[in-house]
Amino acid sequence: MARRQRQRLCPEITDPELRGFLDMVPSIRRFQHQVLEAQTIKGEQMLIALEGREVQVFLHRARSAGRPVVYELHGGGFVLGEARRDDAICSEICELADVNVIGVDYRLSPEFPFPAPLDDLCDLIRYFAQNGQQYGIDGNSVGLIGFSGGATLAAAAAIRSAAGEIPALKGVVLHYPYLDSVHMPSEKEHFDCDMDPAVMSAFTKLYSKEEERSIPLVSPVCASAEELNNFAPTMVIPAEKDALRKEGLLFADKLREAGAAVYCKVMPDVHHGYIEDAGNMEFFNTVTLEDTKKTLNPYFTAWAEAAVRLSAGFLDRRFRGEAEL
């Protein structure tokens, strides 16, 4: 009997430049999920009912009730990735800053392109602002930390917060953020990194339409000074060997010019994704090609630990109301 052919992901997408990559996505997702599902996690897995859907989250509880909450947004180009990969990072921030940390499994593209992942985050923030007490959370004292595409979502949510659409944010941390979808990856300056421009372009095209890419919620670097004026205090931490480094620096400059409080530090000699790689070395060693590993700074785990502690310290100071970034 012939083996049943798997249904193609989003068969309506016929662009030949995307189709080959898109046909590989289900297999990549399955493989990564199998690796992650076999791991022991500390976060409490739960489904939060939002309008018309449920969003999976992983809650790491602070040591005492009524503490603030930090939403953690994983990377993966809006197409790949799971919150459970960052379980150890969430756990460490929870311990260091004594805050609740919620890892968010936002919906992925191309099944759910912009603005679906951003809506998941913003609706979760509203949900816990209204219902946090039943979880022992102060849902109105909020911070965000995002990685790569997750940092895009964090920056976009901060723009919505500045406009009064969601509760005010105490602080935002953006690690190796993707902030400029207007200029395609082939136009960006590339460094000694492991990011494939073709894959980056595919992520971009699968997340947003061409006419959407100049919208600040898709490309935060396109935000006006007025839109950034009430932006929450922010830490921008680009990676030196990342093709996205310049847009992180540009966004930090735009925040300063708009009068927002911003701290920016380029982490030296590290690659895009180094924090999440270091936070889950079992996953990194399983899915990363050996040739790629040889190109990376062998001490990237130490820089990742420094970056996590820097992030936790920043958020802790913000929740304490300290003016110093």
Image (spheres, rainbow, N blue to C red):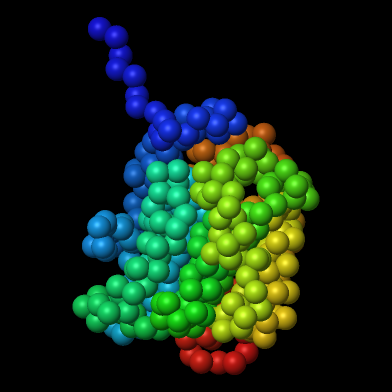
Residue 315 rendering spot, x and y as whole percentages? 52, 79
From this view, report whether residue 67 is shown above or below residue 291. below
- Residue at the image position 24 percent from the left and 81 percent from the top: 133
- Residue at the image position 54 percent from the left and 27 percent from the top: 20
Would you say 79 lies left or right of 44 here? right
Residue 60 rendering spot, x and y as whole percentages? 35, 68
From this view, report whether residue 241 is shown above or below residue 255. above
Q: Is residue 75 visible?
A: yes
Quadrant of the frame with the N terminus = top left
Would you say 14 lies left or right of 122 here? right
Would you say 96 lies left or right of 194 here? left
Q: Is residue 86 visible?
A: no
**Residue 291 appears in which quarter of the rendering?**
top right
Quadrant of the frame with the C terminus = bottom right
From this view, report whether residue 140 is shown above or below residue 308. below
- Residue at the image position 40 percent from the left and 49 percent from the top: 112
**Residue 155 appears in which quarter of the rendering?**
bottom right
Would you say 294 lies left or right of 43 here? right
Residue 249 rendering spot, x and y as whole percentages? 72, 67
Q: As rendered, which of 86 and 174 lies closer to the eye?
A: 174
The residue most toward the top is 1
- Residue at the image position 62 percent from the left and 34 percent from the top: 290
The residue most toward the front is 211
